[in-house]
Image (tube, rainbow, N blue to C red):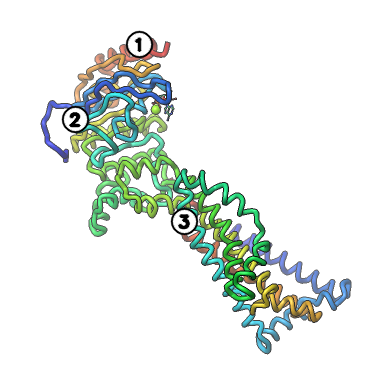
């Protein structure tokens, strides 16, 4: 499913000395980061430290004021079709006047999928995110968890090589959040997509990530990098009880506490 | 069930109003020269339809109203979309609009007469000028108020400019546009009547004016009743269209 050349062990996304200022305020400073193919990298940090900004730069929605980001070796100049963005505010990112099927269809219409092929693709995508019987519902008739599943389905319709997720489960209740974490990991495993995952939930970062990057605020810069060597597939109970998980959690908490000071 | 009760209640209010009107007329609380009872007004209405040219007048008013409204709607929505979807246009054209908007449409009637004479074209111009404002302003608002996140979704999906308008901006602005269409229709009806009175065009405005001039109050009331009904039917039609187009707004909530 991955597009482009499939050289494992090579960076798919590379931040090189990325700086970003809004007017005179420095938001991000000298971010150097490589994300390997198929890797899940989580970005954590205190609120306002620039996580969303860094992700937006990686998607091409925002241009850095210094340095650059390369995707598969080519500089990112704007959003790419093979990079899907899961926005935090699913309620605003869906078309309220379209049904679930219609919302997924938007991504297919964008690439000119023939009408005759759309229905089957939409059914398959909705089934994949656990919404097989909700094709005719409008977003206003769906719970938050269902709306976020729907947004993910639309993203998967892009057949993305990379998923950029900005606190995708932050607004959901704990149970739904855990369900979606597992479903997301399952989907990523079958598609082999590379993931940049922003969250403020440290346990979530360790649970889903292969690597966790902690940002320091004012200006945002990388302060810690943790390799997560927990066995996959992850398990909501066993993984979270793993001594290694607890050790990583303590390390990350201490980092965040010092960063917030 | 609740909707049915409301409808019954509103029917009862209308019936009560007609009854009071009848009583006032029967006891001659107001001189019958000015106020005929509903019975006489109704008789005049039926007579006008069958034996006189009231039906032609009604058709004339409908035609003036719809023509002006249609021109205003198309122009208003197209211009509104152009202005509303561009910050540049909003900044530069906005002030001009704010200057023109408060001009009462009746103030441009002399100008329209000077240009077009006492002709249907003059009525069309005046009605369209008056009815375009609600359409234009609500469309501008609708296009300016599109959720910015949706434009980012459009960029992420590489939607073409045309796709963004057709699939995102237009449906998002639709509730505002429909509200403008509804207001515009009311304005178009009012101006159609005014133009018919001033320019003597075939229509209910002229009918009502002549009836008043010759103290035929039942005829006058027949015309007024038709005008009321016309406005009512127009609003109802737009209501139905709105309910169909905006199903997504009224969630039949099941989680
Ligand atoms: N468009 C913008 N203009 C000016 N400042 C902004 C803009 N977007 C974000 N910021 C500022 O940049 C900083 C980082 O924001 P953000 O990346 O959203 O943080 P996070 O996602 O880590 O909470 C914040 O201080 C925020 O106020
Ligand atoms: Mg954020």
* Label 1: how many Cα within 10 Å (few below 14, some 14–19, many 20+): few
- The answer to whether B70 appears left or right of A251 in the picture is right
Q: Could you tell me which secondary element the residue under label 1 belongs to?
A: helix
Closer to the camera in the image, A110 or A194 = A110
Task: Residue B120 in the image: state x and y as whole percent.
Answer: 59, 75
Q: Could you tell me which secondary element the residue under label 2 belongs to?
A: strand
Q: Could you tell me which secondary element the residue under label 3 belongs to?
A: helix
Name the residue at 66% across, 82% down. Answer: B54
Kindly report the distance in space between the C-alpha atoms of the residues bearing marks 2 and 3.
44 Å
Locate residue B146: give its quadrant.
top left
Disc 1 target residue: A254
Task: Residue A17 in the image: state x and y as whole percent.
Answer: 27, 21
Q: Nearer the viewer, mark 1 or mark 2?
A: 2
Same-chain status of marks 2 and 3: no
How many numbered marks have been drawn onto this rendered protein structure? 3
Name the residue at 36% across, 39% down. Answer: A148
Q: Are marks 2 and 3 in contact (CB under 8 Å)?
A: no
Disc 2 target residue: A12
Disc 3 target residue: B247
Name the residue at 38% across, 17% down. Answer: A219
Q: Label 2 marks which chain's residue? A: A
Locate residue B195: give its quadrant.
bottom right
Q: Are marks 1 and 2 in contact (CB under 8 Å)?
A: no
């Amino acid at each position: 499913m991955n597009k482009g050349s499939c050289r494992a062990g090579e960076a798919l996304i590379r931040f090189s000395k990325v700086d970003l200022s809004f007017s005179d305020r420095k938001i991000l400073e000298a971010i150097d980061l490589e994300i390997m193919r198929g890797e899940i990298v989580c970005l954590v940090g205190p609120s306002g430290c620039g996580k969303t900004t860094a992700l937006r730069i990686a998607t091409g929605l925002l241009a850095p004021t210094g340095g650059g980001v390369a995707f598969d070796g080519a500089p990112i100049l704007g959003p790419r079709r093979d990079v899907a963005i899961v926005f935090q505010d699913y309620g605003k990112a869906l078309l309220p006047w379209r049904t679930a099927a219609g919302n997924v269809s938007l991504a297919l219409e964008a690439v000119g999928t023939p009408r005759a092929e759309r229905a089957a693709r939409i059914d398959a995508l909705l089934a994949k995110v656990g919404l097989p019987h909700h094709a005719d519902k409008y977003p206003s008739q769906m719970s938050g968890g269902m709306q976020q599943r729907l947004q993910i389905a639309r993203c998967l319709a892009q057949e993305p090589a990379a998923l950029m997720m900005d606190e995708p489960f932050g607004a959901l209740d704990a149970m739904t959040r855990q369900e979606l974490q597992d479903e997301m990991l399952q989907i990523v495993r079958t598609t082999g997509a590379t993931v940049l995952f922003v969250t403020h939930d440290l346990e979530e970062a360790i649970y889903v990530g292969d690597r966790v990057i902690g940002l320091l605020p004012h200006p945002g810069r990388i302060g810690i990098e943790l390799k997560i060597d927990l066995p996959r597939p992850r398990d909501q109970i066993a993984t979270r009880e793993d001594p290694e998980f607890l050790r990583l959690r303590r390390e990350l908490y201490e980092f965040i506490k010092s960063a917030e000071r | 069930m609740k909707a049915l009760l409301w409808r019954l209640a509103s029917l009862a209010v209308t019936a009560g109003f007609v009854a009071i009107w009848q009583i006032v007329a029967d006891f001659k609380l107001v001189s019958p020269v000015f106020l005929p009872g509903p019975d006489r007004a109704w008789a005049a209405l039926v007579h006008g339809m069958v034996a006189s040219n009231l039906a032609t007048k009604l058709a004339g008013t409908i035609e003036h109203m719809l023509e002006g409204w249609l021109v205003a709607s198309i122009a208003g929505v197209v211009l509104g979309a152009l202005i509303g979807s561009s910050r540049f246009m909003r900044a530069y054209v906005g002030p001009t609009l704010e200057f023109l908007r408060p001009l009462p449409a009746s103030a441009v009637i002399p100008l329209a007469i000077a240009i077009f004479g006492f002709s249907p074209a003059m009525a069309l111009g005046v009605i369209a000028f008056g009815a375009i404002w609600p359409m234009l302003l609500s469309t501008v608002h609708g296009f300016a108020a599109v959720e910015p996140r949706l434009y980012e979704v459009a960029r992420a999906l590489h939607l073409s400019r045309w796709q963004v308008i057709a699939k995102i901006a237009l449906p998002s602005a639709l509730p505002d546009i429909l509200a403008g269409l509804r207001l515009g229709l009311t304005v178009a009806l009012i101006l159609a009547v005014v133009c018919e009175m001033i320019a003597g065009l075939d229509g209910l405005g002229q009918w009502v004016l002549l009836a008043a001039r010759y103290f035929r109050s039942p005829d006058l009331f027949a015309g007024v009743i038709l005008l009321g009904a016309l406005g009512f039917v127009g609003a109802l039609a737009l209501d139905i269209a709105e309910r169909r187009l905006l199903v997504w707004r009224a969630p039949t909530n099941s989680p």
